[in-house]
Amino acid sequence: MKPYAAADIGTWDHTADVVIAGYGVAGAAAAVEAARAGADVLVLERAGGWGGAAALAGGFIYLGGGTALQRACGFDDSPEEMATFLMAAMGPGADAAKISAYSEGSVAHFDWLVECGVPFKPVFYGEPAWEPAGDEGLMYSGGENAHPFAELVRPAPRGHLPQMENKRTGERGGGYMLMKPLVETAERLGVKAHYGMRIEGLVTERDGTVCGVVARSYGERVTVRARRGVVLATGSFTYNEEMLAAHAPLLLDRPGSAVEEHDGLAVRLAQALGAGIAHMDACEVALHMDPQYLIRGIMVNGRGQRFINEDTYPGRIGQAALFQQANQTFLVLDEEGFEEAHRVSPAPEMLQLRPSWVCETAAELAAEMGLPPGALEATLEVYNRHAAEGRDSLLHKAARWLRPLRGPLGAVDLRGMTSGFALGGLTTGPDAEVLHVDGEPIPGLFAAGRATAGIAAWGYASGASLGDGSFFGRRAGRRAALNR
Ligand code: FAD
């Protein structure tokens, strides 16, 4: 991982003002802005084409503060309210400076995306779901309208989705309609890209300034000089088992919403230059169940106790399940709730899991599930008593979703049903400059996307990755282009 010395390179195979590693969302946004700032830009992409995880993604981009899309859908929002929500939901330990810049710049960032050609359909999707059923453009994507955030700050939906017909998240999702216009914009601006080229080292001048990269293309070593700066945009460390074991061990064997190219290389290369890292234990976690079911039942742990309001962002339920409940959780539902969810859910079959146990009484169900005697019965007694009164005094699920669970009960076995990606990474400044552990920028080195610790420090909201990746990617590109 040690850097190469520029003096040892000899001849350079390629030269550009700004060299960007990775052509996913952060790399594409950096490329557009670097080119607009007048730089000659070269993107090196390890895969056979642009896209990365971003092109497979559902496409949520977390934006707010009163974007044109929010207004068109009838919602008010302000940068202050957005920042208040993000500081609470992305923490503990969220980066206040980053969140403030992100919230302040969010309306303009939305306009920038539209100007680059990213389409958004001005229709709000209000159903509980991981994603909208169709090509709707706006949705709650972080639990803004549920406890505890709904009491903290006026809720506003901020999950902005590029319009994509026949989307297939994981193959070609809404994120494709983010990436395609960004790459086309970059191409129009003269950005060049080399595919099948994996960067494997940084090159530094004698004074420590980063001035290029060493890459490998079909087994051949390739040297690339960067006159003004290098931008690292190669994604997270989700597929690096050694790094997961060291920093986020609960994510081992359960990578999700990432691609195998996310091998943590950017973090290791920059660390070898003294870069700082942050929030390496934070993870996005998906729970593999449709929220239409979750919201109508109760989530219980291995002791038969509820642990979270089921109407919150399903990613918060996933995080709580994996990190606080040892990944041992069950969904308990009655027949009415199950049938209603089944009737209204547009989710794929894999998110509509069937109950593993169905019994006439809570006691029988608890026995079949192997829960401690009396625990589930006590949980249901309290939940039902409060639900009949229209309140959830324990965990504050909203009244509209409360109904006593009666009659035959079923339990869906959600033990181990989580996956996710790492959120931690390089410490960067407000202009995406990579910071040394001493707090000073490492000259010539910039980074964005999931190679960095972004706006999510521990909590998460859908859209935070495509959001901060594109937002700080732009800053990385512009700042690198203006570097002398
Ligand atoms: P990427 O977009 O993955 O780009 C990194 C690029 O770097 C890749 O093209 C990779 O091949 C390349 N690369 C890696 N190593 C090298 C190397 N050594 N040299 C050269 N190139 C290299 N996030 C959201 O915010 N909203 C969502 O709705 C959402 N849904 C998702 C659904 C799915 C199915 C998936 C897979 C992901 C989803 N995500 C979502 C996560 C999001 O896509 C990623 O976190 C985001 O794309 C990270 O941006 P990035 O630019 O850091 O990485």
Image (tube, rainbow, N blue to C red):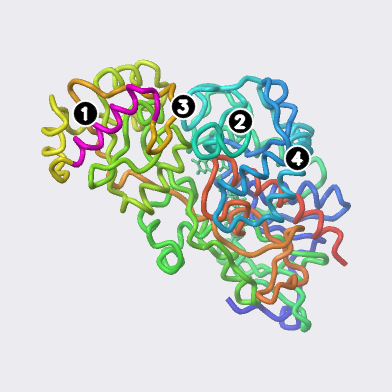
N-terminal label among 1 and 3:
3
The residue under label 2 is 157
**Label 4 CA crowd tier, 10 Å (few <14, some 14–19, many 20+):** many
Q: CA distance from mark 4 to mark 2?
A: 16 Å
Amino acid tagged 3 = Pro
Q: Residues within 10 Å of mark 3 (few under 14, many from 20)?
A: many
Residue 363 occupies which quadrant of the picture?
A: top left
Q: Is residue 95 visible?
A: yes
Give the Cα separation between the discs numbered 2 and 1: 32 Å
Q: As shown in the figure, which amino acid type bears the numbered disc 1?
A: Gly
The residue identified by callout 4 is 109
Q: Earlier in the sequence, mark 1 or mark 4?
A: 4
Q: Is residue 376 magenta?
A: yes
Say above or below: 87 vs 139: below
Residue 393 got which mark?
none
Q: Which residue is mark 3?
A: 128
User: Do the residues under discs 1 and 4 have CB atoms within 8 angstroms?
Assistant: no
Marks 2 and 3, the one that precedes in the sequence: 3
Residue at point 75% right, 70% down?
441
Q: Secondary structure at mark 1?
A: strand
Pick the residue in front: 298 or 44. 298
Of the pair 52 and 84, the residue shown nearer to us: 84
Q: Secondary structure at mark 2?
A: loop
Q: Position of residue 391 (x, y in %)?
A: 40, 28
Who's the residue at 85% across and 47% down the image? Answer: 36
* Image side of residue 66 versus residue 175, left or right: right
Q: Earlier in the sequence, mark 2 or mark 1?
A: 2
Q: Say whether residue 9 is left or right of residue 253.
A: right
Give SS at disc 3.
Answer: loop
Q: Is residue 337 above or below residue 484?
A: above
